Amino acid sequence: MRNDNTNTDNPIPAPNQRAINADELLLRTPRRRAFITGSEAVAEAVKRANIDMSIAYPITPQSESMHLIGDLYAQGYVRDYYRAENEFAVMAAIHGAALGGGRVFTATSGPGTLRAMEMFPVWAGSRQPIVCAFMCRGVALPPSIQPENIEMAFLLDTGMLMFHAENAQDFFDMILAAYAIAEQPEVHLPVGVFADGFFVTHTREVVMLPPDDVKLHAYSPDIAPIQPFDMDHPPVRQTRDPLMNKSNFTSYAASASWHQEILAAAERARKHIDRFMGGLTEVSEPNAEIMIIASGTAASQSREAIRSMKKDGITVGMIKVKSVRPFPTKEIIAATEKAKLIVVPEFNAGGWLAREVKASLNNNNRVIAGPRVFGGMALPSEVIAGEIKIFLNQNL
C-alpha cells in the first residue's frame, strides 16, 4: 500500500493533507461555499482524491480542467502528470498506470471520446477502477464544439459505470464518489462521470467544498480482484492469453463468464451508489400523473418548466437520473406507477435516455421521446412545458 506522505514521482513536496475515508469526506465533513466553474470543480475533486497519476490531452471543452490538474501537479497534489500524444494514447497509458496499482484520473470530450473508444471496454474487461470525466460536446458533421451528449450513447455498453452530473456540485461530488464506488472489491470497474460541456464546465456557480487539507485514503490494490502488474504477476497471467485462442471452446466459456462477471459487478455497485450518491435517481412529486425524466442539464431546464407550470396549477413530477449505468429501472418503474404522461427531454439527436426509459416500462406508450435539441441549441423550459400542454389540450 502506498504511503500517503510520500510523493516519489513529483519532486515538489506533497501538501499537508489528512487522509480520511470516503464516508467522512463525502457525507460528514463540513463544507464552505466557493463560486467556481465546472472545470474548477473537477480540479477541486482531484485535489482531494489522492491521485497517483493523471495524463492529459487537450480538447475543448475539457482542456481547462486538465490544465488545472497540471497546476495541482505543480503544487504537489498529484504525484505524476504529463501530456500524451493523443486521446487514444492517454487512455492506453492511464490503463497501464491503473494496471500497475495506481489511482488515476483523466478526462476527454466529444471526438476525443470517439478516438479513444477502443480502450473503454478494455478498462472494464481488465476490471480497473479508472475515473474519467467526460465534458460532452458535439461529434458529428458539420463540426461542432457545442454542448451535446450523444457520446454517452456510444459508451452505454462498454462495461463502465456512468454518472451524469447536472451541475458543478454534482460534478465535484460524483468524481470523488466514483473512486469510493469503483474501488469496492466487488465492483472494481471504471467510472465515467459526464457533464454537458460549456453549460457546466464554463459556468460559475456556488459549489460546497470540503477543506483543502483532507483527502481520500490511498488506493490499495491489495484488496482488488485483479492483481497489479509486478515482477511476481507478469502480464501474460494478467491478460488471460487462453482467451485469445478463438477456436477453443474453453476460451469461449471463459470469455463469456468473464463478461457476465463485469455486468454483475456493475449491478453490485448499486448499493454503493445509494451510499455515496444518495441513490441512482432523485424524485420529486412521485404521485404526479405527469412526470419528466431527465439527466444532466436537461434536469435543470426541466425544473424551470415545472416551476412555470405550477403557477398555472399543473403539478408535474421529475425523476433526475444520476446513474445511467447501472440504469435505475426499478426506481423508474416505481416512480412512474401513476403517471399518464412521461416526457424525456435531452441534449442529443438520438434520444438515448428515452430509449432506456421505454425499455424499462411495460406501458411505454406514455413516453414522449423529447423534446430533443442538439448541435449546441438551447432547450428553453417553455419547450418542455409546451410538450406537456399539448398533451393536456388533447386530453381535456
Image (cartoon, rainbow, N blue to C red):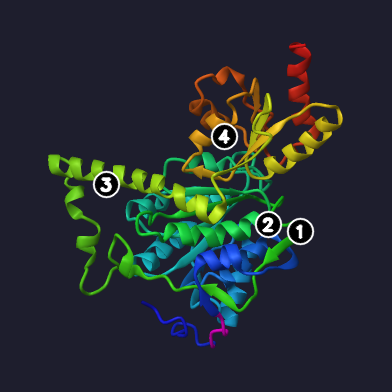
* Residue drawn 51% across the image and 54% down it: 275
User: In the rendered view, does 321 fall on the left or right side of 158?
Assistant: right
Measured Cα–Cα span from mark 2 to mark 3: 36 Å
* Magenta residues (range): 13-17
- Residue 1 visible in the shown view: yes
Residue 205's label in the rendered image is 1
* Above or below for 27 versus 231: above
Dot 1 or dot 3, earlier in sequence: 1
SS under mark 4:
helix
Q: Is residue 270 magenta?
A: no
Assess whether mark 1 and mark 2 are in contact (beta carbons under 8 angstroms): yes
Residue 172 or residue 112, whichever sits in front: 172
Measured Cα–Cα span from mark 4 to mark 2: 21 Å
Residue 70 or residue 76, whichever sits in front: 76
Dot 4 or dot 2, earlier in sequence: 2
Measured Cα–Cα span from mark 1 to mark 3: 43 Å
State the residue position of label 2: 168
